[in-house]
Image (cartoon, rainbow, N blue to C red):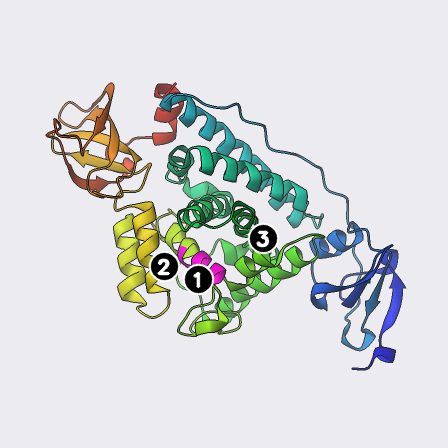
């Protein structure tokens, strides 16, 4: 392709199907993050809202269509007051998590309608997640365990953003980088909104043709995110690499080894871990230990083994927010990891298995010298017909 094959048009003339190569603003001519077809209404609206005056397109590679697009509504997360004791921290984390879910739902609804995605809104949410993670990671980590099968599409990206932030902080990344990684995690699956809903809701194994269609969600996600003015390269790396695998078995580009940077290796672990430990329409959740076993033994060369070990150490054998059975025949929720003695975290006991009723809440440090209780096994809340989110709303206040 030569420069004289390109055509310059006003931004108002840009339509779906056009192949964009350059964007012209009031101050400069910029090459877009990922040149290519404007395939989604979301991308189209993002480019029109970017401050661009004109764009260079390649007519020979364009497939012109047209579709009206409406501007998006703008919402911002609720600011959280500083929390003091454990119960207050949990309540603050719950409020932030619920607000974040609402923002995710609105963002997804906008994408489905072809409206633009507001990067500032995603960045603002990332900032609040980072602030919470740096001040008290345990309370927000608890929220990642409060999973609802019917809200997986909203919770998955949010949980990945939280887990990515906690993991990056554990690895001692700079705060500004962590925020970009969190934004990438929040946006990594937005392309699913341009996949047929019947495929998203599909139960059972995909046919080869269906799986090929599902793979396109990564390209759509990259396209939507690339059209957002100010999106960082770190955020885009998280989005484009989350399904790539070190052994070359991933998609969409079958990258391997050094072609996948540390951000891609981290999100691959986080995305897989959260998916495996979540109830989905087509598959029940597995315990964290089982998830790591599947990732380690089931696909031995797909993930970065050193990072896997670090993630296990960061999240813990019994992750914060998970439910455990104690030797005293009580149920307890893990509230703080013990990196030195992973089998002895701090817990909150609240339920008698023998009596089948809620007890007075008791904080227990299983590593304390005077303590005789210990964890016997992890359990699922539905084994005892427990609603952990309801328990946290009504009891931890």
- Classify residue 296 by image quadrant: bottom left
Residue 307 tag number: 2
Check the picture and name the quadrant holding the N terminus.
bottom right
Callout 3 crowding tier (Cα within 10 Å): few <14, some 14–19, many ≥20: many
Residue at coordinates 26% horizontally, 58% vertically from top-left? 293
Residue 125 seen anywhere in this rendered image of the structure: yes
Q: Position of residue 289 (x, y in %)?
A: 26, 51
The reply to whether dot 2 and dot 1 touch (C-beta < 8 Å) is yes
Earlier along the polypeptide chain: callout 2 or callout 1?
A: 1
Mark 3 or 2: in front is: 2
Check the picture and name the quadrant holding the C terminus.
top left
Q: Secondary structure at mark 1?
A: helix
- Classify residue 38 by image quadrant: bottom right
Please identify the dominant SS of the magenta region: helix
Residue under label 1: 265
Mark 3 or 1: in front is: 1
**Nearer-the-camera pick, 175 or 142:** 175
Measure how far apart labels 3 and 1 are at the Cα level. Answer: 20 Å
Residue under label 3: 190
Residue 280 forms part of the magenta stretch: no
Q: Left or right of 216: which side holds 282? A: left
387 up-or-down from 159: above or below: above
Q: Secondary structure at mark 2?
A: helix
């Amino acid at each position: 392709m030569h420069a004289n094959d390109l055509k310059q048009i006003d931004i108002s003339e840009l339509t779906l199907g056009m192949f964009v190569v350059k964007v012209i603003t009031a101050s400069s001519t910029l090459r877009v993050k990922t040149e290519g077809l404007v395939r989604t209404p979301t991308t189209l609206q993002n480019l029109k809202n970017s401050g661009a005056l004109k764009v260079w397109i390649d007519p020979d590679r364009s497939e012109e269509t047209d579709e009206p697009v409406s501007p998006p509504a703008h919402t911002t997360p609720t600011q959280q007051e500083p929390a003091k004791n454990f119960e207050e921290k949990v309540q603050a984390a719950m409020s932030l998590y619920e607000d974040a879910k609402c923002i995710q739902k609105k963002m997804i609804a906008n994408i489905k309608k072809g409206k633009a995605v507001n990067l500032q809104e995603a960045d603002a949410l990332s900032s609040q997640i980072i602030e919470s993670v740096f001040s008290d990671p345990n309370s927000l980590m608890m929220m990642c365990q409060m999973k609802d099968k019917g809200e997986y599409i909203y919770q998955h990206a949010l949980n990945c953003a939280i887990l990515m932030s906690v993991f990056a902080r554990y690895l001692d990344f700079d705060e500004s980088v962590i925020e970009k990684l969190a934004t990438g995690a929040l946006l990594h699956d937005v392309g699913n909104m341009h996949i047929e809903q019947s495929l998203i809701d599909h139960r059972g194994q995909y046919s080869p043709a269906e799986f090929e269609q599902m793979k396109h969600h990564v390209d759509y996600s990259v396209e939507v995110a690339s059209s957002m003015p100010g999106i960082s390269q770190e955020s885009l790396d998280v989005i484009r690499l989350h399904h790539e695998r070190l052994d070359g078995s991933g998609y969409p580009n079958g990258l391997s080894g050094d072609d996948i940077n540390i951000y891609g290796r981290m999100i691959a672990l986080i995305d897989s871990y959260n998916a495996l430990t979540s109830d989905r329409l087509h598959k029940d959740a597995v315990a964290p230990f089982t998830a790591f076993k599947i990732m380690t033994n089931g696909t031995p060369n797909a993930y970065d083994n050193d990072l896997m070990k670090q993630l296990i150490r960061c999240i813990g054998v019994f992750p914060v927010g998970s439910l455990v059975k104690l030797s005293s025949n009580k149920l307890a929720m893990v509230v703080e990891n013990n990196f030195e003695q992973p089998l002895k975290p701090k817990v909150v006991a609240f339920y008698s298995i023998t009596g089948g009723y809620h007890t007075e809440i008791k904080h227990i440090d299983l590593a304390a010298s005077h303590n005789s209780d210990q964890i016997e096994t992890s359990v699922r809340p539905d084994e005892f017909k427990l609603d952990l989110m309801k328990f946290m709303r009504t009891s931890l206040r």
